[in-house]
Image (spheres, rainbow, N blue to C red):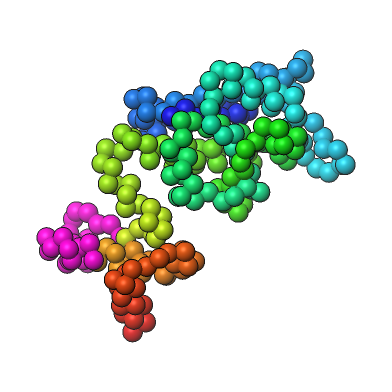
Amino acid sequence: MRIDVVTLFPEMLTSYCQFGVTGRAAKTDIFSLQTWNPRDFTQDRNGRVDDRPYGGGPGMVMQVQPLAATIMASQEAGAVGPVIYLSPQGRQLDQDAVKHFSTLPGLTLLAGRYEGIDERVIDRFVDEEWSVGDYVLSGGEPAAMVMIDAIVRLLPGTVGDPKSVEFDSFSDGLLDFPHYTRPEKSEGSSVPAVLLSGDHAAIEKWRMKESLGRTWQRRPDLLDNCQLSSLQRELLDEYIKESTL
């Protein structure tokens, strides 16, 4: 997969993609990162890429010419897939969207700065707008990192054991179940006995119940969109009853 990022701070992206799972994926050519700096394409002799907004107001707005030239240059160099503008006004990113993006041959992420970008760039080049949350960042680069990390870890070969991503939070619309590792006892707290039993059916049932219960406690809104089986409904009812005793 090829991911292109239009950014005034390419080092932020290239540095991030040298570490962890994302770094390993890049080194093994599971995905490639290309960065494009609008300052390299501006016609302004001082390297300017922004100006004051028409109509007045604080801050600066990124200009059409350098952004348009940058996006076109990336496409001429092989960028494929949708152009995505990272904006708090976009649709909020979720796991279903991440799964979809991971099936594409590529995409281009447009990281804005200042007060945003000229609307004419969005009208002409942007296919979709996405947000990583209902808050404002100083720029689109952190959001681009979030998207890249979430997408790349789903690409075949990125994670050593594919099953490890199948049970992530949100993979089935629910939050993940609790995890434990050695030692068996720590400061008076023990690992749940069922996890030591060797009874795989009982373990799976416990994990399902805990996943449902955590979702009910922490993100009940997610349950509104879940089609629970009769077993899941029974386990959730048990969890709620036990937690309210």
Residue 201 seen in the current view: yes
* The one of 88 and 173 positioned closer to us in this rendering: 173
Q: Outermost residue toward the top?
A: 45
Q: Residue at x 18, y 55 (%)?
A: 183
Q: Quadrant of residue 41?
A: top right
Could you say where residue 237 lies in the image, as x and y percent from the top left?
34, 77
Q: Is residue 9 magenta?
A: no
The magenta segment is 178-205
Q: Vertical placement of 127 versus 31: above or below?
A: below
Q: Is residue 86 left or right of residue 180?
A: right
Q: Outermost residue toward the left?
A: 198
Q: Quadrant of residue 201?
A: bottom left
Q: Residue at x 46, y 30 (%)?
A: 105
Could you say where residue 65 lies in the image, as x and y percent from the top left?
74, 24
Residue 196 seen in the current view: no
* The one of 180 and 91 positioned closer to us in this rendering: 91
